[in-house]
Structure formats: C-alpha cells, structure tokens
Image (cartoon, rainbow, N blue to C red):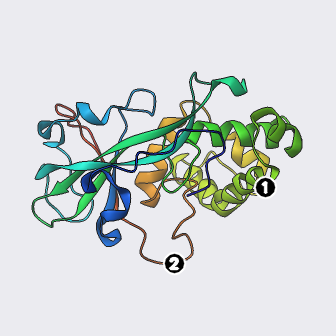
C-alpha cells in the first residue's frame, strides 16, 4: 500500500485484534466486491448476515454460507463529489472494511466497495481522472502533482499501473465489443475507451480477468487472492468472478 499523502490522525493503538489488518492469515484474505456501494456510501456496520445469502464464495462453490467476521481498517483517497478536480474535494480517510467468513471453506473475505483498488491508496475514479489529465488533456505531471499535492513520483506510479494493464484493458474491450474495436490503437485511444459509468467497466473487467483493474500486486506471479461479486439480497442477476 502506498504511503499516506496527506496529514491525518494516527490510527488508534487500541484496536482490538478483530479490527487489525495484520492479524489475518494472508493466505485466506480474499475479496468480495459490493457493486451497490462506493467509498462514499459504504458503511461496514450496515452489513447483516442475510445480505450475503445469494453471494457465491470466491474460493469454493458454496453460496450464501457466510457469517460476519469482524472488520479491518485501511486508508483510502477518494473524491467527495464525482468528477471533481478541486483538491479540496479529495478525502483521505481511515476506512473500515467489513469481513465475512465462509462456513464451508473457512476462508475470510473482505467486503470491498466497488471503487476501491486492492492494495492501492487511490480509488478508481481518482486514478481515472489522473490518467484523463495525462493522456487526454495532456496536463504535465508536475502540474497535476501541484494541483493535488501529490509527489511527481506518485503520479508516475499511476502511469506505471496503467502501462501494466493497458494490454489487458485493450483485450477486455476487444472481447466485449462484438468486433467493433480495431487493431493498432494507441495508449490514448485505449484509455479513451474507459467511459462512464466507470463502475461498469471495473465490474466487467473483474469478471473477465478475475482481478480488479489497476491492481498491480501479484501481477507477475501466481497467488493473487480470489475475487468475487457480492449479490445483495434480492439480486438474482449477479455473475461472479
């Protein structure tokens, strides 16, 4: 995870073991994305056991066999309002993530809002607006860094994440476009394909590639945690990663 970018309160040293991210076996830290929630609407305390009655475990074939399993905290940077370029609207928050445990395979799963990128500080929209400024609006790196008080090295890390995924993004659109996407697209052209609603892009990409877009950890080796999609109670049309 990247280092925090802004001044913030230090996390409480008295968090109970069930609320610490370092007390879980990393081999069992898998993820379920709730595409009905973003960082702005996510509330870890609102989840009840019945919410996951139609959710498939990303690690085993069981469906709906979950119990609530505490939570953990992480930092996240997101926009207070969508499509906002004002640095005052960037929120840096110490964020509580709900966890559930599959009764069948004993694996625990983080229930993630859909705009979080695993192991990244920035949310999906912040990454996409940064790339939009760079590739489509041709804004210099140093100007973006000054605008949002990021280091220029951090902006380059966003570019690096895009370059790691650019071929897979292109293949995703090729596979889902029914032959309307041609060959020989530039990086600018490929990024321009990611349009609103960006959440639908992330969901489709996750279901096709079994990992979230712009997630760089594990990219060059096996062992990435299984990822799935949360099916809220009553949603019978969910497909799973």
Spot occupied by residue 89 in the image (x, y as percentages of width and height): 64, 24
Where's residue 45, x and y in %? Answer: 25, 33
Q: Secondary structure at mark 1?
A: helix
Q: Is residue 50 visible?
A: yes
Q: Nearer the viewer, residue 171 or 54?
A: 54
Estimate the x, y position of residue 140 in percent, counting from the top left: 89, 42
Residue 41: quadrant of the picture: top left
> Left or right: 81 with respect to 45?
right
* Coordinates of residue 220 in the picture (x, y in percent): 57, 75
Describe residue 125's horizontal placement relative to residue 150 as left or right: left
Q: Quick one: quadrant of the N terminus?
A: bottom right
Residue at 22% of width from left, 33% of height from top?
235
| Position of 9 relative to 156 (above/below) | above
Residue 7 found in image quarter: top right
Q: Which residue is mark 1?
A: 153
* Precedes in sequence: disc 2 or disc 1: 1
Observer-nearest of 38 and 121: 121
| Residue plotted at (73% across, 43% down) | 131
Question: Local crowd at mark 2 within 10 Å, few (<14), some, or many (≥20)?
Answer: few
96 vs 161, nearest the viewer: 96
Q: Which residue is mark 2?
A: 221
């Amino acid at each position: 995870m990247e280092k925090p970018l802004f001044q913030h309160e230090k996390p409480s040293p008295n968090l109970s073991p069930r609320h610490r991210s370092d007390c879980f076996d990393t081999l069992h830290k898998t993820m379920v994305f709730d595409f009905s929630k973003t960082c702005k609407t996510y509330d870890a305390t609102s989840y009840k056991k019945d919410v996951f009655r139609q959710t498939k475990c990303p690690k085993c074939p069981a469906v709906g066999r979950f119990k609530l399993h505490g939570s953990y905290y992480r930092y996240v940077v997101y926009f207070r309002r969508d499509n906002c370029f004002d640095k005052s609207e960037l929120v840096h928050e110490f964020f509580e993530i709900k966890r559930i445990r599959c009764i069948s395979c004993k694996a625990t799963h983080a229930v993630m809002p859909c705009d979080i990128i695993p192991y990244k500080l920035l949310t999906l929209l912040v990454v996409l607006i940064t790339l939009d400024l760079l590739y489509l609006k041709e804004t210099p790196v140093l100007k973006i860094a000054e605008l949002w008080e990021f280091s220029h090295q951090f902006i380059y890390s966003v570019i690096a994440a895009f370059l790691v995924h650019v071929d897979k993004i292109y293949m995703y659109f090729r596979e889902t476009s029914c032959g309307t996407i041609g060959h020989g697209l530039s990086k600018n052209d490929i990024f321009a394909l990611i349009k609103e609603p960006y959440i639908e892009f992330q969901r489709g990409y996750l279901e096709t590639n079994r990992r979230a877009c712009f997630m760089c950890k594990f990219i060059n080796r096996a062992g990435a945690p299984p990822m799935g999609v949360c099916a809220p109670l009553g949603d019978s049309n969910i497909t799973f990663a």
